[in-house]
Every structure is written in C-alpha cells, then in structure tokens.
Image (cartoon, rainbow, N blue to C red):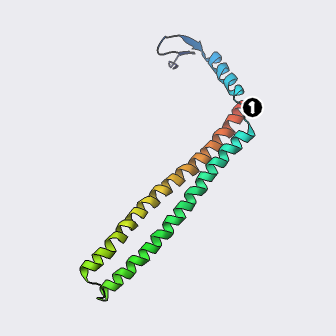
Amino acid sequence: MYKPQRSKKYTCGKCRNKIPLDDMDQIFVEQLKQFHFDESEIAAATDAGGSAITEREKLLALTAKESQKLAAKMGKTYELFLNDTLDAPDFVELYQPLKDRHRELGLTNARLQGELDALRIAAGSSDVSIEDSRVLYSH
C-alpha cells in the first residue's frame, strides 16, 4: 500500500484498491489493541537479551585476558632471542604460532565487541519501541 501525494486514500500497488486514510488508521489502532503487552513476555524477552549481553561480556573478558597472556609470552620469547638464548629458526618456530594466535584473538575481540554493541543497541531500542507502542496505544 502507498499513499499518493495529494490523495486522501491508500492505494494497493497490485490490485489498485483504495482505502481511505481514516479507515487505515482505524485498522492500525485495532490491530495495536489486539497486540497486548504481557509483562511476563516482555520480561522474558528482556532477560534473554540481558543474558546474551552478559555472555558476550564474559567471552570478551576471557579473550582479552588470553590475549594479554599471549602478549607476555611473546615478549619473553623475544627477550630470549635478544639475549642469544634462542637462534633465529627456534625463535620463528616458537614465536610464529603465538603471533598467529594473538592476531586471531584480536579479530575475535573485535567481533565480540561488535556483537556486544549491537545487542546493547537492540536492547535499548526495543525498550524505546515498547514504550512508544504503549504511548500510541493509550491515545
């Protein structure tokens, strides 16, 4: 359905049926009234979103901690190389897997942070949407 600029009716793009604006508004309000706000359903959805956020926060903390440990291990390996305790081939053999894992963790941290931000935004916008629907419903 679309509403031509100067028309007072909505028009169906396929069949070209027309519905007056007032009727369409009334249909919308009636459908909104049928959608009831069950507090337990809203609370369950909010809790599910909150648990997903908590889970991502824990994963992010774990990967950040592992990344710090790997950085320390990489530093120690480099120190061994600088002190001539390790020769170049041994250094590469020890350092390269640490470096690869550290890079993977950096990408994982970035992905988790993005997911966490998206979940937080979604939780905030759903709260706003529910409140706006309640205000619209009360009018």
Q: Residue at image x 71%, y 44%?
A: 43
Q: Residue at image x 53%, y 10%?
A: 17
Which residue type does callout 1 highlight? Ser
Residue closest to the eye, 9 or 73 = 73
Crowding at mark 1 (Cα within 10 Å: few <14, some 14-19, many 20+): few
Q: Quadrant of the C terminus?
A: top right
Asked if one can make out residue 68 in the rendered structure from this viewpoint, the answer is: yes
Q: Residue at image x 46%, y 74%?
A: 69
The percent position of residue 33, horizontal first and vertical second, equals: 72, 26
Q: How many marks?
A: 1
The percent position of residue 96, horizontal first and vertical second, equals: 31, 71
Q: Residue at image x 55%, y 11%?
A: 18
Residue closest to the eye, 96 or 139 = 96
The percent position of residue 83, horizontal first and vertical second, equals: 31, 89
The image quadrant that residue 61 belongs to is bottom right
- Is residue 47 toward the left or the right of residue 74 in the image? right
- Is residue 89 toward the left or the right of residue 7 in the image? left
Residue 23 higher or lower than 40, as above or below: above
The image quadrant that residue 67 belongs to is bottom left
Residue closest to the eye, 55 or 114 = 55
Label 1 secondary element: helix
- Is residue 98 toward the left or the right of residue 55 in the image? left
Residue 62 higher or lower than 116, as above or below: below
Q: Which residue is mark 1?
A: 138
- Is residue 99 toward the left or the right of residue 114 in the image? left
Asked if one can make out residue 7 in the rendered structure from this viewpoint, the answer is: no
Residue 9 higher or lower than 136, as above or below: above
